[in-house]
C-alpha cells in the first residue's frame, strides 16, 4: 500500500470527528437509561435473615436457589390457582380506619389460645416435606419457632421422626393429623404425638383432593418427578382416582369421625380446614375446642373464597364459644391486624370498627 493511501486510512477528517462526537452525545442518554439503577453488587445477593422484612422477601430467594419442582410444590395452588390468588387479593379489599387521639400505651400483641400464652398471635402452620429444604427439616423449624417464642404445629407426616423433633427444642408444640379410617391406627398416631409432648391435636379435614397443574407441567417438561431426600419419585402415570389427584385414603370422611377420636385426644381438639359458618357450627357440635379457618393456602379445592372473606361469618356463627384461628395467604404484619379486627370482635385492642371492607 502506498504512503498516501496509508495516511488516508489513519488520519481523522473533521467530518469524521464531528460525526463521532455527535454519535457519542446522542448515545449517552440512551446508554444511561440502560444502566441498572441498582448495580449487581447491591441487589443480586441473598439478604441476611435480619434483612427480610416480610414473607414475600423469601420467595425470590427460594425461587433462585431451589429446583423448580421443589419451589413449585411449596408455592403452588390447585387447578387454576384462583384460590391461591384470591387469598392475597382479599387483603387489598380491607382498609384500616385511622382513629387519631387514641393512646397506643395499652396496645399489646400478647394473647392466650387454648392455654398457650403467646407474645404475638402467630403459630407455625403444619407443612410437609421440610427436609427437602433443610437437612434438619421439621426439627430445625421447631428450634427456630422456639427461639422466636412461637408455637409450632408439627405436621403428621413430618420428614423427621417426632421423637427427634421433640428432642431438639422445648417450646410449645401441637401435632396435626389427617383422619385415619382405621381407629386403632388413628389411636396409635394420636397417642404417639401426645406422648411426644403435643399439647393439642389438629385434625385437618380438607385436602381430600388436590390437582397441582404446576407439578404435572414440571413432570412433563423435565420428565422427572420431585425428588424426596434426593431420591426421584416415580414418574409413572397414576391410576384410578389418583389420576385426578383424589386421595383414595381420604374419600370416606364423615363428621362422626370427630366423635370417634374425641375421647382419644387428651388436650384440645382443633379442626383445620373450615371455610363455612355451617361447618364451624358442626365442629362445635362435635366437640371441637378450636377451629382453623383454612383453605390449605389454595392447595385443596380450587374456587373456594379466601379465608379473610369468610372469617367474619364464621366468627359470628361460633359466637365466642371456641377460639377461631385462620391461615392462608398471610404474608405481612398488617394482614394479621386485618384478620384479628375482622375475626376477634371481643379482643380489646382491635375491633371491626377499625377496618372497612370494599370488595373490588
Ligand atoms: C408445602 C406445604 C405443605 C403442607 N402440608 C400440610 C399438611 O400436611 N397438613 C396440613 O394440615 N396442612 C398442610 N399445609 C397447609 C398449611 O398448614 C396452611 O394451611 C397453608 O400453608 C396456609 O396458606 P399459606 O401457605 O398461604 O400461608 C401445607 C402447606 C404447604 C405450603
Image: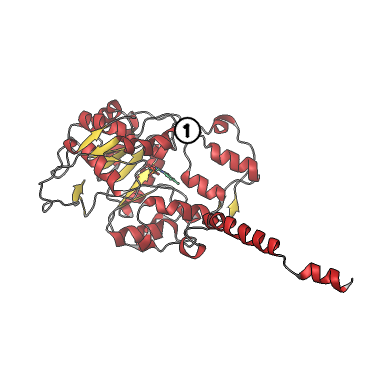
Q: Residues within 10 Å of mark 1 (few under 14, many from 20)?
A: many
Q: Quadrant of residue 340?
A: top left
Q: Quadrant of the N terminus?
A: bottom right
**Side of 12 relative to 345 (left or right):** right
Q: Residue furthest bottom?
A: 3
Which of 92/101 is in front? 101
Q: Is residue 76 visible?
A: yes
Which of 170/68 is in front? 68
Q: In this figure, which residue is indicated by the disc labeled 1?
A: 209
280 vs 328: above or below: above
Label 1 sits on a secondary structure element that is: loop
35 vs 111: above or below: below
208 vs 15: above or below: above
The residue shown at (56%, 49%) is 68
The residue shown at (13%, 51%) is 104
Which of 215/351 is in front? 351
Q: Which x, y percent locates residue 170?
A: 29, 61
Q: Which x, y percent locates residue 169?
A: 33, 62
Q: Quadrant of the C terminus?
A: top left
Q: Is residue 180 visible?
A: no
89 vs 170: above or below: above
**Side of 270 relative to 106 (left or right):** right
Q: Residue furthest right?
A: 1
Q: Which x, y percent locates residue 225?
A: 60, 45
Q: In what quadrant does ligand 1 lie?
A: top left
Amino acid at each position: 500500500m502506498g504512503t498516501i493511501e496509508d495516511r488516508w486510512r489513519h488520519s481523522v477528517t473533521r467530518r469524521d470527528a464531528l460525526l463521532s462526537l455527535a454519535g457519542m452525545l446522542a448515545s449517552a442518554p440512551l446508554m444511561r437509561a440502560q444502566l441498572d439503577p441498582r448495580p449487581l453488587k447491591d441487589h443480586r445477593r441473598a439478604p441476611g435473615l435480619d434483612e427480610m422484612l416480610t414473607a414475600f422477601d423469601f420467595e425470590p430467594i427460594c425461587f433462585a436457589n431451589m429446583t423448580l419442582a421443589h419451589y413449585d410444590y411449596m408455592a403452588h395452588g390447585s387447578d387454576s390457582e384462583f384460590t391461591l390468588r384470591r387469598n392475597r387479593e382479599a387483603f387489598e379489599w380491607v382498609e384500616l380506619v385511622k382513629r387519631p387521639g387514641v393512646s397506643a400505651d395499652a396496645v399489646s400483641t400478647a394473647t392466650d389460645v387454648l392455654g398457650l400464652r403467646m407474645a404475638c398471635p402467630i403459630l407455625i402452620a403444619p407443612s410437609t416435606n421440610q427436609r427437602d429444604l433443610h437437612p434438619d427439616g421439621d426439627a430445625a423449624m421447631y428450634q427456630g419457632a422456639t427461639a422466636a417464642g412461637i408455637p409450632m404445629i408439627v405436621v403428621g407426616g413430618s420428614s423427621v421422626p417426632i421423637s427427634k423433633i421433640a428432642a431438639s427444642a422445648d417450646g410449645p408444640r401441637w401435632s396435626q393429623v389427617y383422619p385415619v379410617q382405621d381407629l386403632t391406627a388413628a389411636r396409635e398416631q394420636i397417642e404417639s404425638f401426645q406422648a411426644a409432648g403435643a399439647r393439642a391435636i389438629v385434625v385437618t379435614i380438607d385436602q381430600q383432593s388436590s390437582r397441582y397443574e404446576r407439578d404435572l407441567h414440571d413432570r412433563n417438561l423435565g420428565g422427572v418427578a420431585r425428588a424426596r431426600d434426593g431420591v426421584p419419585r416415580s414418574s409413572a402415570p397414576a391410576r384410578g382416582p389418583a389420576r385426578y389427584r383424589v386421595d383414595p385414603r381420604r374419600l370416606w370422611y364423615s363428621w362422626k369421625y370427630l366423635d370417634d377420636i374425641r375421647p382419644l385426644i387428651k388436650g384440645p381438639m382443633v379442626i383445620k380446614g373450615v371455610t363455612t359458618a355451617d361447618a364451624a357450627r358442626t365442629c362445635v357440635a362435635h366437640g371441637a375446642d378450636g377451629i382453623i379457618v383454612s383453605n390449605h393456602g389454595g392447595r385443596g379445592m380450587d374456587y373456594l373464597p379466601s379465608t379473610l372473606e369468610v372469617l367474619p361469618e364464621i366468627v359470628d356463627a361460633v359466637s365466642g364459644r371456641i377460639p377461631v384461628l385462620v391461615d392462608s395467604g398471610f404474608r405481612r404484619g398488617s394482614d394479621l391486624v386485618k384478620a384479628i379486627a375482622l375475626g376477634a370482635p371481643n379482643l380489646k385492642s382491635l375491633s371491626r370498627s377499625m377496618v372497612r371492607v370494599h370488595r373490588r
